[in-house]
Amino acid sequence: MTRLETAPHKAEKTTKIPRWVLGLGPLVLIAALIALFSLLNAPGLTGLGDDRPPEEAVVVESIELTPGQITLTVRNEGADPVTIAQVVVSDYYAGFTQSENQMAHLESNTVTVSYPWVEGDPYDISLITSAGGRVDATIDAAVLSPDKGASFFGLMALLGIYVGVIPIGLGLLWMPFVRRSSKAWIRALLAFTVGLLAYLTIDATLEGIELVRDNASYGGPLVVLLGAVTAYLVLEGIEGWAHQRTTTHPATQPANMANPAQLSPQMLSLLIAVGIGLHNLGEGLAIGSAYAVGSLALGASLVIGFAIHNTTEGLAIVTPLASQRPPLTRLATLGLIAGAPAILGALIGATVYQPTLAAFLLGIGAGALGQVAIKLLPMLQDHTGRTLTALTTGGIITGLAFMFTTGLLVIT
């Protein structure tokens, strides 16, 4: 009996270890282990790679041409430091200067080559490292890089308006047509929107992967998937917050919503505008960077191509609002959310373009567009509850085909 009585007494005197100590413990042990390895000079680990040649992985991120000079921005992707020792331009050893005598891992270097290039001529450039490695770059047709002054930034803003704001604004003019359509037509238009968003999702993903296909710095193509997953989760979190707010405050829930778990038309149109805006941000980055190096074919074909291609994005924004009477200010706001990022993208791309950043932003656009496309699927259901009917399947295929066809008109 005495033993049974003393057991609780002992338990009461037991001191519990704080939870934060339990969480910090493994980190302290890891730090101690690393310190021990460093103190003992990591026996058994050092010297393993002494006999191997240095790993040189250098990529050319951008090329700028000024009178008598070719400026290249390069980055070291390998683990070992790299030194540029020589520069060869079309089989000619050219003089050069560089901002860094040696590039550490992931460090960039600006190499300025003195060479009397001729406008319109092609050039093959090879950077020779101190270990004998070669880093190749090609200029298809030499063009003087534009002076980045006020007129240049004005042109970039105008170009963003051409390819983003105006086409989407024209697409919003489909609102009266959408409002007068029957329920069957609305489902078809929503299916068309799903096809459009699916195409943009695939297009943004492939564009991002293409940008960093031969560039492993900062994870290479992995950054595209990281951006897509990040955008998808962020939008899901925002949607969850919106549902929670609606549940907490029932008065804010629209009276015509049969399913409380379904997004409201206003929220759907906003998400579509955000997703398209993120895609147009990546599109603007590509346009601005291409123009900065003189490789963008400007002219009526570019404006016409983007106008036809992006006008349907405005239709995608207004279709969920078929049963609504949104004020013009709301439509204008949605149009700016979707189109204005093209202006910002063009300005960024023409000044501080970086392939990995552009790929990450394209991944964000892909994730956002994919998330919205998934949220639209329940709205395709007919009276039997079936989502993929002959009507909706045809609408999705038509959306994919239309975007692919009009995409061929965009010449860059």
Image (cartoon, rainbow, N blue to C red):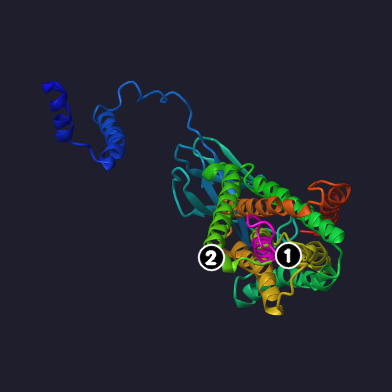
Q: Which residues are magenta?
A: 256-274
The residue that appears at 28% across and 42% down in the rendered structure is 20
Name the front one of labels 1 and 2: 2
In x, y percent, where is residue 408?
Answer: 83, 55
The residue that appears at 82% across and 48% down in the rendered structure is 384
Q: Is residue 5 above or below residue 308?
A: above
Decide which of tag 1 and tag 2 comes sooner along the chain. Answer: 2
Q: Is residue 63 visible?
A: yes
| Amino acid identity at mark 1 | Ile
**Which residue in the rendered view is the most extreme toward the left?**
2
Q: Is residue 373 left or right of residue 15?
A: right
> Is residue 258 found inside the magenta-colored segment of the image?
yes
In x, y percent, where is residue 211?
Answer: 65, 48
Q: Is residue 272 left or right of residue 395?
A: left
In x, y percent, where is residue 149?
Answer: 59, 74
* Label at residue 249: 2
Circle 2: element type: loop
Quadrant of the snapshot with the N terminus: top left
Quickly name the residue at label 1: 317
User: Badge 1 local density, few (<14 within 10 Å), some, or many (20+)?
Assistant: many
